Image: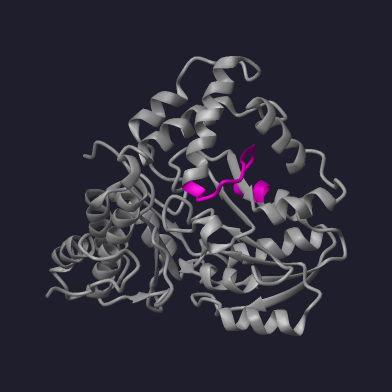
Amino acid sequence: MRNKSRLLTPGPTQMPERVRLALAMHMIHHRKNEFRTMLGEVEIMLQKLFGTSQTVIPLSSSGTGAMTAAVHSLFNPGDEVIIVNGGKFGERWVHISETHGLSTIVINVPWGQAVSADQVRACLDEHPNAKGVMVQVCETSTGVLHPVKEIAAITRTRDVLLLADGISAVGISPCPMDEYGIDCLLTGSQKGLMVPPGLGIIALSERAWKRAAEIPVSCFYFDLIEEKKELEARNQTRFTSSISLLHGLNEALCTIFRHGENSLDALYHEQWALTCMVRAAIKELGLQLFAEDHYSWGLTSVLLPEGIDGTKMIQYAEDNYGVIFGGGMGDYKGRIVRIGHMGWVDWSDALAGLTAFAYSYKAVGGFTSSRSYLEVALDAYHTALTIEPGTPCPDSRA
């Protein structure tokens, strides 16, 4: 018998109780003062989270809607763009761009590996007419963290916009937009922001807004210039808002910033410690991490041995332990288990997830001789809390 399920997927994620209660609030009208006040509070906190002085726009859409808005708002059909494709969501940049009629130059990166800044620089040198570079901060299908800071150091010195999909990174790992020089940063509500799916959130740099002002409108709904005008002039969205989701987002952001000035430091320390915790346990179990280097702070992908059916393993964990993992995508369906440890997940959730993972792995034919993986995980967690986030994870007991 169990009292609850644990959602350990890379989105949607678990929600704090205060967010769940906010979602159940009475309905208000989206053109009245109560809504405008709330949206103004949300805007201030989103700017802090994104690390920008620019307007941050919530859209009633999934994260893919925000990606679509970025492409339509910043490029004309026929423009040349460079896209890093290292997984399912790199592919999505390609599909959106080609649908808009852009000329795509694709840097194909093997799944499980990160692009290098040198690869991007070389591609830009070879294609001097490129108007933009598109990349994932974290490629959700693999758990890889691309070096966006290093890429931004290249693009910000050229007349090239950098579009960064931060759907599995914002609120999970640092990606301060203005400091890095990112021209477009976007996310969705259902991951690090701990709200149900349904909000796409996007911000543009000053030079990206200048570019957007020169681009003819090609998508009536995703017109970021008009959205910006409404938000800055009246604390309003252009169309009917996702009122309940914005209530939830307000509470989620209040939760994130509950520690005052040190809130983001505390958040990133915890996320890094959870990452080190899960990775250490997987190594102790004798299994292969799919992203060996440049790995996500909120997602650990595990490559299963030949003969182990990841789909059956995930189903076993849900049926027997109430723990829900993510599966592999594309060619890696059934080969990978993706463990989400972002948002409202804490160390006890991660311990329960690792226990379910190990027992489910053995139930479908896997073998491990380790009996100390949970102890190793906790040691890694406590050690990681004492070091600078982003430094190498401890993966064994001292």
Find out whether residue 97 is within the magenta segment: no
Q: Is residue 217 above or below residue 129?
A: above
Q: What residue sits 20% from the left and 66% below the top?
A: 380
Q: What residue sits 66% from the left and 18% below the top?
A: 31
Q: Where, by quadrant of the figure, is residue 161 drawn?
A: bottom right
x, y percentage for residue 203? 62, 48
- Return the residue nearer the eye: 9 or 386: 386
Q: Is residue 3 above or below residue 377?
A: above
Q: What residue sits 27% from the left and 60% below the top?
A: 273
Q: Which residues are magenta?
A: 49-66
- Return the residue nearer the eye: 387 or 362: 387
x, y percentage for residue 156? 64, 68
212 vs 177, left or right, is right
Q: Where, by quadrant of the figure, is residue 376 drawn?
A: bottom left
x, y percentage for residue 25? 46, 18
Q: Is residue 54 above or below residue 398?
A: above
x, y percentage for residue 311? 44, 61
For the N terminus, the image quarter is: top left
380 vs 288, left or right, is left
